Amino acid sequence: MPLSPMPSAPKGSESTASAYASAAQSYNTVGPRPPFNPLPACPNPIKWDVEGRIAELQAIIDSPETKEGQKINLQAAINLYHEKKLPAIAV
C-alpha cells in the first residue's frame, strides 16, 4: 500500500508557531543566573573517632569468641585505618 503524502499545515499554523517561540523566549528572559555555589550535603562535618574505632576492633580481635577468619578481616580493617584509607569519603 503506497504512502499518502502528508497534508499541508493548516492556515494559522505560522501564528501558532510564533506564539510557541515567543512563549519559549519569555522563559529565557528571567535574567542572569547567580553563580553556582552548592551547599555541602552535610553542613557540619562528621568527626570520626578513628582511634576509638581501632581500639574497638582490637577488643573484638582479643575476644576469645572471635573466630580466626573474623580476626583476619578485622586486622585488615585496622590496617586500612592506619593507612588512612578509612574512613573513606562517600561519593
Image (cartoon, rainbow, N blue to C red):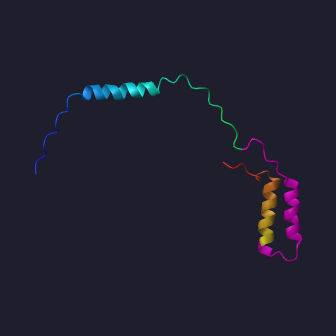
Q: Identify the image quadrant of residue 35.
A: top right
Q: Is residue 65 left or right of residue 30?
A: right
Q: Nearer the viewer, residue 14 or 90?
A: 14
Vertical comparison of 68 with 49: above or below: below
Magenta region includes residue 66:
yes
Magenta region includes residue 48:
yes
Q: Residue at x 87, y 65 (%)?
A: 58
Q: Residue at x 46, y 28 (%)?
A: 27
Vertical comparison of 19 with 5: above or below: above
Q: Position of residue 68 (x, y in %)?
A: 80, 75
Q: Position of residue 9 (x, y in %)?
A: 20, 33
The segment highlighted magenta reads 42-69
Q: Is residue 86 left or right of residue 51?
A: left
Q: Position of residue 54 (x, y in %)?
A: 86, 59
Extreme residue toward the left, this view: 1
Q: Is residue 49 left or right of residue 42?
A: right
Vertical comparison of 47 with 25: above or below: below
Q: Identify the image quadrant of residue 45.
A: top right
Q: Identify the image quadrant of residue 14.
A: top left
